[in-house]
């Protein structure tokens, strides 16, 4: 089972879109795929028709001392074959305050996923945009990290914070974490996109995906329909871009081209 996290310490850069689209492509190729929503906002959970404000059993349950519920009981089906969801609850927003410095809380998700190793081929984790126990859990459980970066100037600050977090987590893991920076929402008609992409190429060339995810309004349509874009319109340019990204991730030895 391969576990990929999608994270950046800035919101609105395409994390959920990346997780959903790659998961849909993997499922369509015959891989049993699990999406894990670790963001208290629950965008991924809402995407597939579940309400993070009222859902009874969620990722939050795994962090409760009195919870003896098997993680397999929390996994929800979607209406797409081979595509499953471990949903979020808005109660996740209280975890950092509840847990404080309690030991062992950074490995909860990793331990839960071990129980599902025989059920799923791929796991994609949608992370919150802040450093805390949830992001630490995701990075600790992952073999690969995707860092979507919107091609606009403010997104570069979020990337700098993410790089500092990666260095910290790598020291704690005591083993490398392969990662790949993915330029998203690229619009070649705008100066901001062009200059931001050039900045990324100048400063992160060794860990930067060589292509881009373009602006594609059909991602919004897919979100409204609650389905991966590859199911709604397999010929969309956004699907072509994510198909190329997936090929770069699973091609060869399956290693992302960078690491810390």
Image: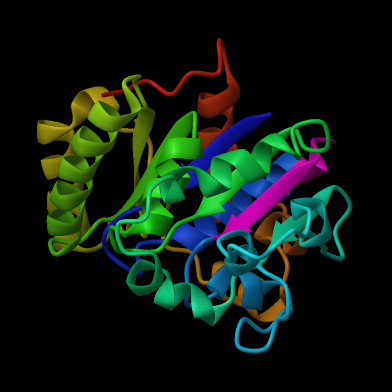
Can residue 198 be found in the magenta stretch?
A: no
Which residue does the image show at 23% across and 28% down from the upper left?
171
Residue 222 x %, y %: 66, 71
Residue 97 x %, y %: 33, 73
Residue 79 in the image: above or below residue 258: below
Residue 63 position by quadrant = bottom right
Report how many numbered discs are placed on residues in the image: 0
Q: Which residues are magenta?
A: 27-37
Residue 191 x %, y %: 14, 60
| Residue at the extreme front | 66
Q: Is residue 198 or residue 176 the one in the foreground?
A: 176
Which residue does the image show at 35% across and 69% down from the upper left?
12
Residue 25 position by quadrant = top right
Which residue does the image show at 77% across and 62% down from the upper left?
74
Residue 208 visible to the viewer: yes
Which residue does the image show at 43% across and 37% down from the upper left?
140
């Amino acid at each position: 089972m391969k576990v990929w996290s999608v994270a950046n310490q800035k919101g609105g850069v395409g994390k959920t879109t990346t997780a959903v689209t790659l998961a849909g492509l993997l499922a369509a190729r015959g891989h049993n795929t699990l999406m894990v929503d670790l963001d208290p906002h629950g965008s991924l959970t809402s995407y597939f028709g579940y309400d993070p404000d009222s859902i009874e059993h969620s990722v939050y349950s795994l962090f409760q001392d009195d919870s003896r519920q098997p993680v397999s009981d929390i996994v929800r089906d979607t209406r797409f074959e081979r595509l499953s969801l471990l949903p979020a609850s808005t109660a996740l927003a209280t975890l950092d305050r509840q847990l404080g410095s309690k030991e062992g809380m950074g490995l909860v998700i990793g331990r839960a996923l071990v129980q599902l190793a025989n059920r799923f081929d791929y796991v994609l984790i949608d992370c919150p945009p802040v450093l805390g126990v949830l992001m630490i859990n995701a990075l600790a459980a992952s073999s690969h990290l995707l860092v979507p970066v919107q091609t606009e100037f403010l997104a570069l600050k979020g990337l700098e914070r993410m790089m500092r977090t990666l260095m910290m987590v790598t020291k704690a893991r005591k083993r490398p974490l392969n990662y790949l920076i993915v330029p998203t929402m690229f619009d070649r008609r705008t100066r901001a996109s062009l200059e931001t992409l050039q900045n990324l190429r100048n400063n992160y060339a060794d860990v930067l995906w060589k292509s881009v995810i373009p602006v594609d309004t059909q991602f919004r349509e897919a979100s409204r329909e609650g389905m991966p874009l590859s199911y709604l319109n397999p010929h969309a340019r956004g699907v072509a871009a994510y198909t190329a990204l997936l090929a770069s991730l699973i091609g060869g030895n399956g290693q992302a081209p960078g690491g810390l």
